[in-house]
């Protein structure tokens, strides 16, 4: 039964991807070649609508072909025409599907900062490009040491993306840990948190610097899997009993808008302290979500 379910889900996902991605790419190419600002602006809700429809099919599959329950807690009352910075912990590829199920058509389309290598994922890479997902180099310290010119490229890419996003309703997604949580990474970092890796504050600071005045709020999202960290196949094979998501809407500290995280050491220290406090709250929330009995 599970194998048949997996085959059916894979078939529907493949057909849905082709049906949605091909018109999405065609519209994106037309938008790129027609140099009329009003026309390009008019294309944005059409592109987002196609993406939301595509996500809607995936959410239908979750709801009808798996028994996995999504339990939401925390704040609500968000706006489809809002501007949000979404911060979340990261454990699994299931996180992305969880966020899309929790927020699709409740807030603007979630856009992620992606590794540049993901551009080459068949169909999906082009779809992300068409939807203006920013691609980042995410250079290692060793790469920057060998070529200092790389140091500012991701910052410049962040600024370009934020300038583009300021004109449309947007939800910018940031997995603040920068990588998926594993026990090995947790031990190697000597992380002070029980359920989290240390937060990488720079990306959050750069978005607030570039878009702070245009953002309505920060959505602080905690994702928990009481049965253990799943793989994507676990969701498709109906092996995840419950996923818990807690959402807290946070005001944006006004004194962080316009700060120079890269060059102002005092500002950087204050920002990291604030980010660490947010992470302490998130760690406590995750502990509660993980220890509550599954009913």
Image (cartoon, rainbow, N blue to C red):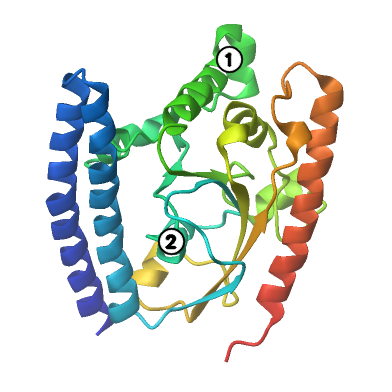
Measure the alpha-carbon separation of dots 1 and 2.
Answer: 34 Å
Residue 137 appearing in the image: no
Q: Nearer the viewer, mark 1 or mark 2?
A: 2
Q: Which mark is residue 106?
A: 2
Q: Say which residue appears at 73% left-offset and 74% top-offset.
A: 288
Crowding around mark 2 (Cα neighbors within 10 Å: few <14, some 14 to 19, many 20+) is some
- Residue 23 drawn at (x, y percent): 13, 43
Judge left or right: residue 237 versus residue 33. Answer: right
Closest to the observer: 226 or 172?
172
Q: Is residue 47 above or below residue 220?
A: above
- Residue 89 drawn at (x, y percent): 61, 54
- Residue 33 drawn at (x, y percent): 17, 20
Closest to the observer: 290 or 71?
71
**Pointer 1 or 2: first along the chain:** 2
Crowding around mark 1 (Cα neighbors within 10 Å: few <14, some 14 to 19, many 20+) is few
Q: Say which residue appears at 58% left-offset and 26% top-offset.
A: 210
For the N terminus, give its image quadrant. bottom left
For the C terminus, give its image quadrant. bottom right
Secondary structure of residue under mark 1? helix
Q: Hey, which quadrant is residue 131 in on the image?
A: top left
> Which residue bears the numbered disc 1?
152
Q: Say which residue appears at 38% left-offset and 83% top-offset.
A: 67
Secondary structure of residue under mark 2? loop
The reply to whether callout 1 and callout 2 are in contact (CB within 8 Å) is: no
């Amino acid at each position: 039964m599970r194998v048949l379910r997996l085959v059916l889900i894979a078939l529907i996902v493949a057909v849905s991807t082709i049906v949605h991605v091909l018109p999405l790419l065609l519209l994106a190419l037309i938008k790129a070649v027609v140099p009329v600002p009003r026309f390009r602006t008019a294309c944005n809700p059409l592109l987002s609508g196609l993406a939301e429809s595509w996500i809607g099919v995936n959410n239908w599959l979750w709801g009808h072909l798996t028994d996995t329950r999504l339990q939401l807690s925390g704040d609500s009352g968000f706006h489809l025409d809002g501007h949000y910075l979404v911060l979340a912990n990261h454990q699994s590829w299931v996180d992305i599907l969880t966020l899309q199920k929790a927020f699709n058509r409740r807030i603007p389309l979630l856009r992620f900062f992606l590794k540049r290598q993901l551009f080459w994922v068949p169909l999906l890479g082009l779809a992300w490009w068409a939807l203006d997902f920013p691609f980042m180099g995410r250079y290692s310290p060793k790469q920057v040491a060998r070529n200092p010119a790389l140091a500012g490229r991701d910052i410049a890419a962040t600024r370009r993306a934020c300038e583009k996003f300021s004109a449309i309703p947007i939800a910018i997604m940031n997995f603040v840990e920068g990588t998926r949580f594993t026990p090995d990474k947790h031990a190697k970092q000597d992380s002070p948190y029980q359920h989290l890796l240390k937060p990488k504050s720079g990306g959050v600071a750069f978005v607030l610097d570039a878009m702070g005045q245009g953002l309505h709020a920060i959505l602080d999202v905690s994702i928990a899997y009481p049965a253990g960290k799943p793989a994507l196949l676990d969701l498709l094979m109906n092996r995840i009993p419950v996923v818990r998501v807690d959402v807290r809407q946070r005001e944006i500290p006004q004194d962080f808008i316009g700060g120079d995280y890269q060059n102002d050491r005092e500002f950087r220290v204050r920002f990291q302290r604030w980010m660490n406090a947010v992470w302490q709250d998130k760690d406590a929330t995750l502990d509660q979500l993980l220890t509550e009995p599954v009913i």
